[in-house]
Image: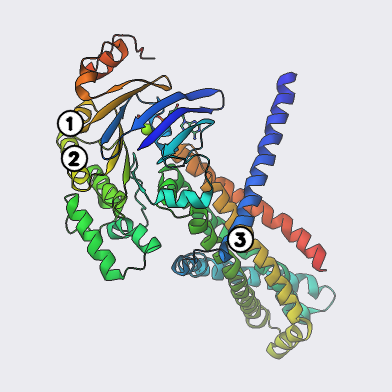
Amino acid sequence: MIEINNLRKSFGAKVILDGVNLTVQKGKITVIIGRSGEGKSVLIKHLIGLIKPDSGEIILDGRDITSISEKDFNTVLGRFGMLFQSAALFDSMDVAGNVGFALREHTSLSEREVMDKVSEKLRRVGLTGVERMMPSELSGGMKKRVGLARAIIMDPEIVLFDEPTTGLDPVMSDSIGDLILETQRQQKTTYFVITHDITLTYKIADTIAMLHKGRIIESGTPEEMKASANPVVRQFIEGRAEGPIKVA
Amino acid sequence: MTGFFEDIGRYTVRVVNSTGLLCAMLLKSFLYIFTPPRLNIRNVFKQMEFVGVQSLFVVILTGSFTGMVLALQSYTALKRFGAESMVGPTVALSMARELGPVLTGLMVAGRAGSAMATELGTMRVTEQVDALFTMGVNPMKYLVVPRVLAGLLMLPLLAIVTDFVGSVGGYMIGVKYLGINSGVYIGRTLDYVTTGDIFEGLIKSLFFGLIIAITACYNGYYATGGAKGVGKAATSAVVMGCVLILVSDYILTSIMM
Ligand SMILES: Nc1ncnc2c1ncn2[C@@H]1O[C@H](COP(=O)(O)OP(=O)(O)OP(=O)(O)O)[C@@H](O)[C@H]1O
Ligand SMILES: [Mg+2]
């Protein structure tokens, strides 16, 4: 279980996170929704230590991971996997190099064992025979799949997804949704997903939380969110231009 | 008026800040060579190939033409006091002490430095650097150390190549074109050029290699602002690298004199 307490972050004078409070349940899929530029990526990057908060805590199994030493944090990192918004595949390496990267860096498995695991994870994300392709040869959807395979190669307990469906067509988005559900169910992993894709949200979420103006303004099950009385939440999940959220 | 002082203040803070970051990167990259986990040797070789082998052609080209023009110029000058036989040592000394290391440095800064900054900058803005971190790999160790080592190791080697082809170029012009006696040309060169001269040049190129790698890595690693930022990083890397090479060249020369 991850508990985020009163997390604050500003860049210069710009306040991005203004006291975020959130509990991420173990073995469940938590989806954070919110508009572009609300600081969703900033929030997820706090969880994995890429950004340090100005104040507040992130408690993972009773320990505040924002204030532990670099060495301890490395063991924490081993429990996480992350799929980046842009997939962030290393473009100097082929698919197998990308997916097997952590295995090569952190284990002493033989090249053969690495390749076996790589192929197995690639099969799990629905890809075969792509091991020798370079990232530049892949479509957006394939990149996300390879990114997911790379994120789960070490069988992490917690996987973070930054906008897994942005830039994909609806059919591909739906199949990524299926993939998220399948991979999560097999291992009962904790998934933390950030998106503004409402269809995907309803498909996969156990819990939904909405980030607005630097805070979590509401959270609950999909049913609870659908029945929300909060006009901001209603406007967002119904996708309307008119309402309390003003488009600049 | 306050705006003016504010600008100066902001500028000063920025310069101090970036100098600090650059020095920290320099220190860390040396520290990381020796701290666990073990350095990825394959990456070091890959960078050495990139900095060294792939710069060979351009270095040979510039080196030989510089040697050739040096022979012509020094011949014109030396003939005035009847010392044509000194063309050989003049060319060799200029190459070994000054032009070999400096030209190599400038060429490699333009070729490899800009490419390094572009590569690291792209990795930064497309979150590949972040991805390395999340996979438990220290990005600075993984990306910067091999490049710094490659710069340090390959620049002296390239400078030797430049020295050599420069001297050969000088010989061709001096002996084949200007008609200086071959034995005299080589004899005089060997009489006047010492290993110390060559060694001083190599010390310089060691520093130049470090400068090229660290300015390229610094600008790329801390690039921001998308594709435009990457372009800016490459430009800054080359400008900063070349300026620092020429400044440190003067300092090193005056120290070693
Ligand atoms: N390193 C940084 N330095 C300064 N500002 C930043 C930094 N990272 C993010 N920001 C700012 O924080 C705000 C939130 O950015 P973030 O990327 O988290 O948005 P997002 O909710 O993920 O949006 P999107 O859905 O478009 O990805 C933006 O205004 C951005 O300019
Ligand atoms: Mg984002």
Q: CA distance from mark 3 to mark 2?
A: 44 Å
Residue corresponding to mark 3:
B31
Q: Amino acid at mark 2?
A: Leu
Q: Quadrant of the N terminus of chain A?
A: top left
Q: Are marks 3 and 1 on the same chain?
A: no
Foreground of the two, A78 or B243: A78
The answer to whether A225 is drawn above or below residue B252 in the figure is above
Tell me, yes or no, whether the two marked residues, 1 and 2, touch with CB atoms within 8 Å: yes
Q: Amino acid at mark 3?
A: Leu
Foreground of the two, A119 or B71: A119
Q: At 73% across and 83% down in the image, what residue appears?
A: B189
Please, what secondary structure does the residue beneath circle 1 have?
Answer: helix
* Horizontal side of residue A75 vs B7, given as left or right: left
Q: Position of residue B168 (x, y in %)?
A: 62, 79
Chain for disc number 3: B
* Horizontal side of residue A193 vs B8, given as left or right: left
Residue corresponding to mark 2:
A181
Q: Earlier in the sequence, mark 1 or mark 2?
A: 2
Tell me, yes or no, whether the two marked residues, 3 and 1, touch with CB atoms within 8 Å: no
How crowded pointer 1 is (Cα within 10 Å; few <14, some 14-19, many 20+) is rated as: some
Residue corresponding to mark 1:
A203
